[in-house]
Image: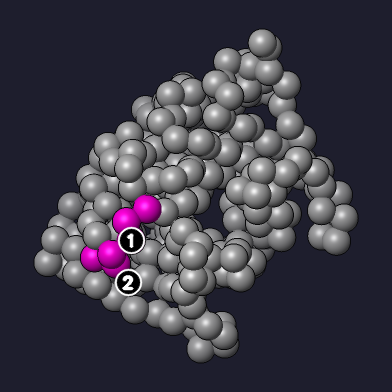
């Protein structure tokens, strides 16, 4: 990552095994932002958004244990174990309180950590949360994965394919099966900290619009749900400028609107609530 000014690649020990991570320069007085990747893939695809946010806070992009450049495991860690590992990463980096930005499987991992260690998580950003009845049974989720593959940027394949091959089909099946049983949208309603859910209109993993609207109406005041038109599942990679703009607007407490300086036809919408 030598071409990324202010970024460095490092490693630390978690449970006696090496965990790789990418980190930007510190920003005094700002809470660090930690990005949590999806299943079977490394944190590399989260970097486009992380780079856009590095001016406001130190950003940390780990490869969770067994993923990417981190040391391989003898078995697949489930979502609760990955949340525990993420907490150990925060401990090792001496990060007392952070903002978590998850994508896909990273959303349930971030939610688990927020429930288990609420004092460590200031806010949650859940991008394309995966899991729940809309991803069941497993064969349906596999079909959704296939449809998403053709909707993502072709550049995504250069990261995803090597990571998927390295993770292996057995690990992928085991973790994907667990992920489909995790009720991410329902857990979002009980998030213990202020949370922003960002979803894409072309995401095949996402629940149908009526279910998203239902969740938006039921959500308590500290939950915000925003929609990016035209985005599929890996918004962090495909729409980094728009996503970073949404995240910064929310963190700053200003209205979330479209960024006219970003290319494309992306629109960001606030979903209405019943009160």
Vertical placement of 25 versus 46: above or below?
Answer: below
Residue drawn at (32%, 56%) of the image: 96
Q: Looking at the image, what colour scheme do you see?
A: one colour
Residue extending farthest to the bottom is 2
Instruction: Find numbered disc 1 in the image and state the secondary structure of the residue it sits on.
Output: loop
Residue drawn at (48%, 23%) of the image: 189
In contact (CB < 8 Å): disc 1 and disc 2: no
Q: Which residue is denoted by mark 1 in the rendering?
A: 95
| Residue 76 left/right relative to 109 | left
Please rate how many residues cluster around mark 1, counting C-alpha atoms within 10 Å: few if below 14, some from 14 to 19, many from 20: some
Residue extending farthest to the front is 29
Provide residue 234's location: percent of width, then percent of height.
59, 51
- Tell me where the magenta segment starts and ends, as one range: 92-97
Label whose residue precedes the other's in the sequence (1 or 2): 2
| Residue 82 left/right relative to 148 | left
Q: Which residue is denoted by mark 2 in the rendering?
A: 20
Residue drawn at (43%, 30%) of the image: 191
Q: Is residue 98 visible?
A: yes
Provide residue 94's location: percent of width, then percent of height.
28, 64
| Residue 88 left/right relative to 126 | left
Vertical placement of 39 versus 129: above or below?
Answer: below
Residue drawn at (18%, 52%) of the image: 75
Provide residue 150's location: percent of width, then percent of height.
66, 51
Please rate how many residues cluster around mark 2, counting C-alpha atoms within 10 Å: few if below 14, some from 14 to 19, many from 20: many
């Amino acid at each position: 990552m030598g071409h990324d000014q202010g970024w460095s690649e490092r490693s630390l020990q978690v449970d006696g095994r090496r965990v790789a991570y990418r980190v930007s320069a510190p920003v005094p007085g700002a809470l660090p932002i930690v990005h949590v990747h999806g299943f079977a893939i490394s944190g590399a695809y989260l970097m486009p958004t992380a780079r856009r946010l590095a001016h406001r806070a130190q950003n940390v992009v780990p490869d969770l244990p067994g993923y990417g450049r981190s040391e391989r495991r003898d078995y697949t860690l489930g979502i609760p174990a990955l949340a525990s590992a993420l907490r150990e990463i925060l401990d090792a980096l001496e990060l007392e309180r952070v903002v978590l930005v998850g994508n896909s499987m990273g959303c349930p991992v971030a939610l688990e950590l927020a429930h288990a260690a609420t004092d460590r998580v200031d806010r949650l950003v859940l991008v394309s949360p995966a899991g729940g009845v809309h991803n069941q049974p497993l064969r349906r989720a596999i079909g959704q994965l296939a449809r998403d593959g053709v909707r993502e940027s072709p550049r995504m394949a250069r990261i995803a394919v090597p990571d998927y091959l390295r993770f292996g089909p057995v690990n992928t099946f085991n973790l994907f099966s667990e992920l489909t049983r995790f009720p991410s949208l329902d857990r979002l309603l009980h998030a213990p900290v202020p949370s922003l859910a960002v979803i894409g209109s072309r995401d095949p993993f996402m629940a149908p619009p009526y279910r998203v609207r239902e969740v938006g109406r039921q959500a308590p005041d500290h939950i915000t749900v925003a929609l990016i038109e035209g985005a599929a599942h890996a918004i962090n990679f495909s729409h980094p400028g728009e996503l970073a703009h949404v995240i910064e607007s929310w963190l700053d407490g200003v209205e979330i609107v479209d960024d006219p300086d970003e290319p494309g036809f992306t629109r960001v919408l606030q979903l209405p609530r019943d009160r």
